[in-house]
Image (tube, rainbow, N blue to C red):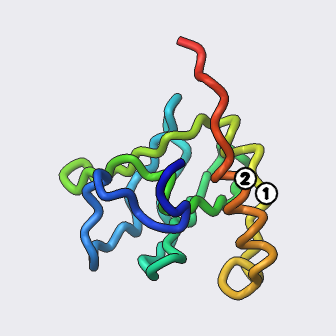
Amino acid sequence: MDENVWGYRSMAAYQTGMDLTGYKVEASDGSIGKVDKHSEDVGAAYIVVDTGTWIFGKEVLLPAGVVVRVDPEEKKIYVDRSKDQIKGAPEFNKEKHLGDPDYRQEVGSYYGRPRPPQMM
């Protein structure tokens, strides 16, 4: 990934001030849930996705850099990771996600890694 994993890509069509809460989130292979909260802080932007029953009611933290497109008309966010890649990410920690640099580094390193080629 060429851009900062904690920043929205310029082509994602995210506009400062957008309220993404409640938007559906689409992985490369299907829906993963809805945005519970988000941040647009420079160098620290992210979305927290409530996965509902998909991962037994867990939440996942996705750095803004995995967002490839925001569609305000459909209220959907598209990310360039598969369900399995998201499921395999470091477990979301509500207490650590805002202020713990080690946790942020762990998540950033996971999502910043080159992705394996996807099977068609």
- Residue at image location 45% in from the left, 42% down from the top: 26
> Which of the two discs, 1 and 2, labels the residue nearer the N terminus?
1
Q: Amino acid at mark 2?
A: Tyr
Residue 66 picture location, percent across and down = 50, 51
Say above or below: 21 vs 54.
below
Q: What's under tag 1, amino acid-wise?
A: Pro
Towards the viewer: 17 or 52: 17
In front of the other: 51 or 11? 11
Total marks placed: 2
Mark 2 closeness class: few <14, some 14–19, many ≥20 residues within 10 Å? some
Residue visible at 77% across and 44% down in the picture: 88
Residue at left offset 76%, top offset 83%: 100
What residue do we see at 49% from left, 51% from top? Answer: 2
Side of 66 relative to 17 (left or right): right
Q: Are marks 1 and 2 in contact (CB under 8 Å)?
A: yes
Residue 61 or 53: which is nearer the viewer? Answer: 61
Q: CA distance from mark 1 to mark 2?
A: 8 Å
**Dot 2 lies on which element?**
helix
The residue beneath circle 1 is: 90
- Please identify the residue farthest to the left as the structure is shown: 73
Q: Position of residue 70 (x, y in %)?
A: 31, 53
Q: Position of residue 18 (x, y in %)?
A: 28, 72
Q: Nearer the viewer, residue 28 or 115?
A: 115
**Which residue matches tag 2?**
110
Q: Is residue 53 left or right of residue 49?
A: right
SS of the residue at dot 1? loop
Residue found at the far bottom of this picture: 99
- Answer above or below: position of 96 versus 36: below
Please name which of the two marks, 1 or 2, marks the residue nearer to the observer: 2
